[in-house]
Amino acid sequence: MKKQLLLLSVLVFALFSCDKEDENPSTFFEGIYENTSSADLEKPYYTEVMTFTKSGKVLIENFVYMVNAEESCLKAYSEGSYRLNGEEFKLTLTSSYGPDPAAFDISEGCIPKENLVNNLNPDYTVRNGILIFEESRESFSLQFPCNDMPNANSICIGASTFEKVD
């Protein structure tokens, strides 16, 4: 009897001690989504393009359209991975390229991609935010807390809306 009780106790313990499966498994999606600041023809405007793959990779490109310019300039880009659990969005950057602050001269115009330098800040490799898809999944809003912004000069601007372009 003691052996049966011991066996039953071990079985009950084993059943209830197992980790529960994640109630919100990670969601991976693919597509190219774009967020554009106001397109005032009297001022430069900026575009952020996020390219997602179903394997969990993300490429983030930042472009600037100068006044009277026909083409955009790549200002910066970052690469990494993402995970979406429900509305909880986790972005992990592995690289972040931008102009070399020591050699940057705004009057030179566009900087070729190969001249951008990796300036990944180790304090901001992981960013946690909220990503909410619209019902059609043709757009989403993305918001990071103010303390998760990529640099000290950033301001808290609230959620950004990204529209699917591909």
Image (tube, rainbow, N blue to C red):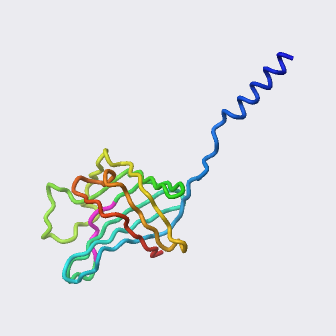
* Residue displayed at 37% across by 67% down: 160
Q: Considering depth in this image, is 123 or 54 the residue closer to the camera?
A: 123
Q: Considering depth in this image, is 34 or 9 the residue closer to the camera?
A: 9
User: Furthest residue to the top?
Assistant: 2
Q: Considering depth in this image, is 47 or 97 the residue closer to the camera?
A: 47
User: Residue 73: within the magenta?
Assistant: yes
Say which quarter of the image contains residue 46: bottom left
* Residue displayed at 61% across by 50% down: 23
Q: Which residues are magenta?
A: 72-77
Q: Considering depth in this image, is 79 or 84 the residue closer to the camera?
A: 84
* 113 vs 45: above or below: above
Q: Position of 58 compared to 102: left or right?
A: right
Q: Position of residue 7 (x, y in %)?
A: 80, 23
* 78 vs 71: above or below: above
Q: Position of residue 57 (x, y in %)?
A: 47, 57
* 11 vs 55: above or below: above
Quadrant location of the N terminus in the rendered image: top right
User: Residue 69: within the magenta?
Assistant: no
Say which quarter of the image contains residue 77: bottom left
